[in-house]
Amino acid sequence: MGEFALGLAALGRPTYVNLGRDGVHRSVEELRTLAHATLDAAWDAGIRSFDAARSYGRAEEFLGTWFAAHPTRRRECRVSSKWGYRYTADWDPDAEVHEVKEHTLGHFRTQWAETRDVLGPPDLYQVHSLTTDSPLFDDRALLDALGDLRDDGIRLGFSTSGPDQADAVRRGLALRVGGAPLFTAVQSTWNLLETSVGPALTAAHDDGVLVLVKEGVANGRLVVDPPATLSRVAATHGVGPDAVALAAIAAQPFVDVVLSGAAGPAQLAANLAPVSLSDAELEDLAALARPSDEYWTHRRAMAWV
């Protein structure tokens, strides 16, 4: 069974690609207070893994200040963050562009320094949204710089999105620098609607790679408008569809970490409601998977709210 972690994508910036958000435009201080409350709730629930990114607005800063307020907690936690996107909306919910992607040596160096300044060295540092056409694969200077960071004791990984996730996972994990694998962790989108990366993640897990799964409720789609099968299973267990969707991920043998993207303490509590799914229920839920291209076409059309 995969363990639960808290991802801060919805807690570090005022807008995100997610259905069902409350629509409140919070100030920096208001969102910091909400983030800290959610982190407290996660700690009380036994969560010890937290995931951020440079593009998650103030997420790294909020996590860093939470650790500063609770100095003994950091050594008990596993922290991951990501570089490769930068947040560009400047707290404007109506910004035309919210984040910009750049996989270059200069951007890596800048964002690594920023991460260390506000959060300290993470336990896992990931390339944000590695795709098969990323310039990273052919940038020897960048690969060597990442190899140096790995050799300094920072575990490296990458996240994936899009219909070519499986190919990105395989190609990324095949990279070697200095005779050793560059990446030993991968964070991919896998949920009841989008399961195409499953075989690639299974092979990665079997090779000892740490597998983290994100977007487990399909950016809110599985909660706001759950399929009938998901609603039926949730009703049987007396929990919400989010708890069932995340429990189905945790039950996958290739999953080490399941990320909750909760936007507040109440949503986190709903995500973590205990559910033990039967083999028959898991089989019924597996039938909800959609063609990958269809899923990602829908995902790209979703608005920042």
Image: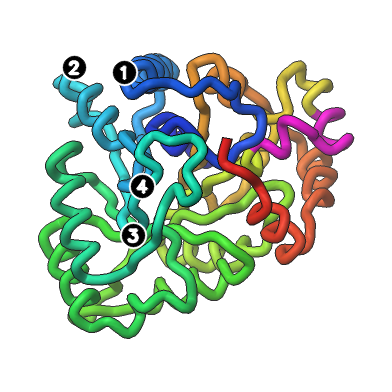
For the rendered model, the colour scheme is rainbow
Q: N-terminal of the two: label 4 or label 2?
A: 2
Left or right side of 16 for 231: right
Alpha-carbon span between mark 2 and mark 3: 28 Å
| Callout 1 amino acid | Glu
Q: Which residues are magenta?
A: 220-233
Alpha-carbon span between mark 4 and mark 3: 10 Å
Vertical relation: 71 (above or below) 4: above
Residue at 67% across / 59% down in the picture?
Answer: 296
Residue at 57% across / 53% down in the picture?
Answer: 189
Q: N-terminal of the two: label 2 or label 3?
A: 2
For disc 3, the marked residue is 84
For disc 4, the marked residue is 87
Front position among marks 1 and 2: 1
The residue tagged with tag 2: helix, strand or loop? helix
| Callout 4 amino acid | Tyr
| Callout 3 amino acid | Gly
Residue at 19% across / 67% down in the picture?
Answer: 106
User: Which quarter shows the N terminus?
Assistant: top right
Front position among marks 3 and 1: 1
From the top left corner, tell me how far across and down residue 98 is, in percent: 45, 47
- Magenta region's main secondary structure? helix
The circle drawn on residue 29 is 1
Mark 3 touches mark 1? (CB < 8 Å): no
Alpha-carbon span between mark 3 and mark 1: 26 Å
Q: Residues within 10 Å of mark 3 (few under 14, many from 20)?
A: many
Alpha-carbon span between mark 1 and mark 2: 15 Å
For disc 2, the marked residue is 69
Mark 4 touches mark 2? (CB < 8 Å): no
